[in-house]
Amino acid sequence: MLGVSQRGQGYISGENVTVTWAVGHLLETATPEAYGEQFGRPWRANVLPVIPEIWQMVVKKETADQFAVIKKLLKKAREVVIATDADREGEVIARELMTYCGYRGAVRRLWLSALDEGSIRQALQNMLPGEKTEKLYQAGIGRSQADWLIGMNLTRLYTLKAGEAGHAEMFSVGRVQTPTLAIVVNRDNEIANFTPKPWWQVRAQLEKDGVTFHAEWVGAEQYCDEEKRCINQPIAQAVLQLCQKTGSATVLTAEKKREKTPAPLCFDLGTLQQVCSRKWGMGASQVLTIAQALYETHKATTYPRTDCGYLPLSMRDEVADVLRAVQASDPSVAPALSRLDRTFMSRVWNDKKITAHHAIIPTRQAFDLARLSADELKVYQLIRQHYLAQFLPLQESDVTEATFNLGNQLFRTRGRVIVAPGWKALFGGQQDDEEAEGGEDAPASLPPLDKGDACRVTGGTVKDNVTKAPAHMTEGTLIAAMKNAASLVSDPQLKKVLRENAGLGTEATRSGVLETLFKRRYLEKKGKHIHSTQMARELIAALPETLTSPGMTALWEQALDDIAQGKSDLHSFMQKQAQWTRHLTEKGRAQPFHVTVPVGPDCPLCGKAMRQRTGKEGSFWGCVQYPECKGIVGEANRKTKRRAAGKRKGSGPKAPGVLAVDG
């Protein structure tokens, strides 16, 4: 397409065109010591906060060679075409290089949502002017610098405070990771403090026209809790006796209506992660990796890091090509494709709902299905299923709701009869996963009911129940909570300014936040559920609510969105972030910090106390006098060892970006 065939070191080229690439971020924000030796080791609380006046970037050592290639090419270039991932982070990867290297030439943007050949050709013909996406860079820089301010300052502050209490662990604090952790900690605390309470459910068994069904007693307010559950056992037993003595119940109201249910939308990344977690216990990071492979490696699906489940109307022109590619890739779906109505307009087609990207769907390019791993196949089939569902009619049910007078007590029932399965025929009942998890009985099929009808009472039961604690979080439910942090906010003023979908992090960053919390031993998995560790609970208890509140951080994320849309500017955002950092630092400095310090053996070399530490091989006890004394006792075998302190290795490169340079 570009006519590039000559391969050089770190680039490929052709006539007047050179293509080079970044391996994630080649630059990183300088560490605090770059802004003054007072910010170096050993850390000191009295010099905090570190708030740079002029932000400095440095070249990552592990990617210095590729940076040198790009810098040399930028010096020769007359025009740059940015072709990194079409999102905020992709924009930052490219533009931070251009800014650092002092590039001042023309800029255009290649905006890709799919990597099949047809989509690439179309994007090449419709490249955007550089200024069209420059605001995404401003928002990305804002996120990076805001994260640095909170992470660097408060991690140092609370690690020092923990050290004063005798704890050797680093207490990591982050603008997004800390309120995310608080969601799990708050849920765990709610479960730990939960007291089960008994309640009773009375059911009458009724019969009419040979059809047997059940109706539930509706208890009066004085016998029920705030959830309208009966908490008075003698009353429940009395109502049961009424059911056993009373011969008939009279229909008070009977309302029948036709319910039409649309197909679920196509997937955004967060919803895909939630469904894969619920169905197969997949982790958020695992789903992102699979979705990225389907996009980059197999060219089977479109760009995955999207927050949108809708499709633009213009893509209806591509439907025939997509369905043709779907069948060519997997001929077994031919019967399902034959039932589709390609003219059907589902709610997924909505230009007003489109954000930077559309939903994840199959591409217009056939691929080798056999090359997919078992997990990749599951996720691909799920994405495909939701796309195909858009061309099937609504699912229709007749729902009847009725109330009864049984011995002057109110009973009610609800029944559902599926009239037209519609799109649900494609799912084979799978869409009822959430209902099954909730443990609710399926609505009964009812006989025809009209006001005044008499139904025979054939029996009754009282079911003993106890209230249940909420379930522990899974990666799927935590991602859902991060997506909709506004729902966790109780403060009416904050709730008023938060948009309905205000969340923590972005589709591109949420799985990484979770991975960080696992790596730092704040969270641990037990089966498919997530639990907070003691260290995590102590940290959240010690931090001010403004730092742990999901609503406050969602407000900052909302501000970043406003920068990306040109409604706000980076300078005012960073001024507020600096002010917030100063406030949190001063508040944290004055607040006591209580942590549990593990009690270990005495040092075998000097007899002093030992602290629990973590190394490459796991936990061990190290002398409090380190580095003067290097006494160590292994956690597993209590053998004394001597080790030299090793340097931590940096994290590996992120997913590749691409920078096209026209020279």
Image (tube, grey):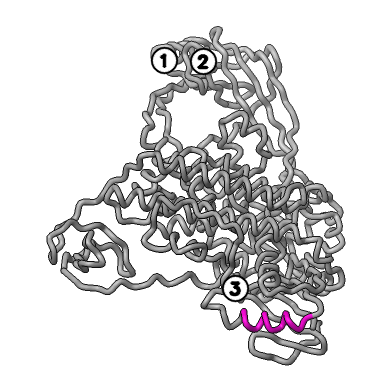
| Point 48% across, 17% down: residue | 224
Q: Amino acid at mark 1?
A: Asn
Examine the structure image and report whether residue 364 is included in the region drawn in magenta: no
Q: Secondary structure at mark 1?
A: loop
In the image shown, does 71 or 508 lie closer to the viewer? 71
In the image shown, does 164 or 452 lie closer to the viewer? 164
Dividing the picture into quadrants, the one containing residue 418 is top right
Left or right, 430 with reference to 314: left
Instruction: Residue under label 2, please give it.
Output: 219
- Please provide the residue range marked out in magenta: 67-77
Q: Amino acid at mark 2?
A: Gly
Are circles 3 and 1 on residues that touch, CB within 8 Å?
Answer: no
In percent of width and height, residue 143 lies at 61, 55
In percent of width and height, residue 172 lies at 43, 54
Gap between marks 2 and 1 measured at Cα: 10 Å
- Whether residue 173 is visible, yes or no, is no
